[in-house]
Image (cartoon, rainbow, N blue to C red):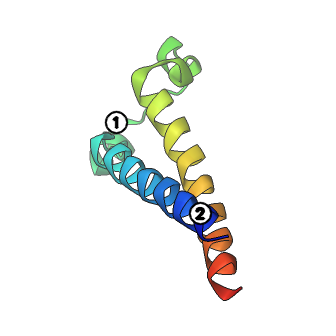
Amino acid sequence: MQVVKYILIGIYIIVCLALIILAMIQSKEDEGASGAITGSTSNNFYEKNKGRTREGKLKKWTIILGVLFAVLTIVVSIMYLM
């Protein structure tokens, strides 16, 4: 049982570090007041294919690692209660 705890902690640390790095390298999507004044059209080619770009992939992996982080947090806490 101790080996499983150590393996889970190792995976947990790797996921934590990857999540921190991915969150830090993402660009800020907020346009601020200039986007509200000028208006942004979301019916262009870039907006339709945004998931295929680098930013889209980073966002997808950040969400996946965030969910994995939450699940591992629960699993590790249950393992330490036993």
Which of these two is toward me, 15 or 33?
15
Q: How many marks?
A: 2
Q: Residue at x 61, y 72 (%)?
A: 76
Residue shown at 52% from the left, 64% from the top: 6
- In this orientation, which residue lies closer to the viewer: 80 or 69? 80
Looking at the picture, how far across and down is residue 15, in whole percent?
47, 52
Say what amino acid the circle numbered 1 marks. Answer: Thr
Taking 71 as reference, is 22 left or right?
Answer: left
Judge whether 65 appears above or below 72 on screen.
above
Q: Of the residues shown, which amino acid type is indicated by label 2?
A: Val
Disc on the earlier residue, 1 or 2: 2
Q: Residues within 10 Å of mark 1 (few under 14, many from 20)?
A: few
* Residue 37, horizontal then vertical, whole percent: 34, 43
Q: Is residue 27 above or below residue 53?
A: below
Q: From mark 1 to mark 2, how far is it between C-alphas?
A: 58 Å
Q: Which image quarter holds the N terminus?
A: bottom right
Q: Residue furthest bottom?
A: 81
Residue 45, image x and y in percent?
A: 52, 12
Give the foreground label among 1 and 2.
2
Camera-side residue of 20 and 1:
1
Q: Which residue is mark 2?
A: 3
Name the residue at the top extreme: 45
Locate residue 69: give its quadrant.
bottom right
- Residue at horizontal 41 percent and vertical 29 percent from the top: 55
Residue under numbered circle 1: 38
Q: Quadrant of the C terminus?
A: bottom right
Image coordinates for residue 17, horizontal then vertical, percent: 36, 53
As drawn, 78 above or below 73: below
Q: SS at mark 2?
A: helix
Q: Residue at x 29, y 48 (%)?
A: 24
Say left or right for 35 vs 62.
left
Does residue 57 sit above or below 59 in this rendering?
above
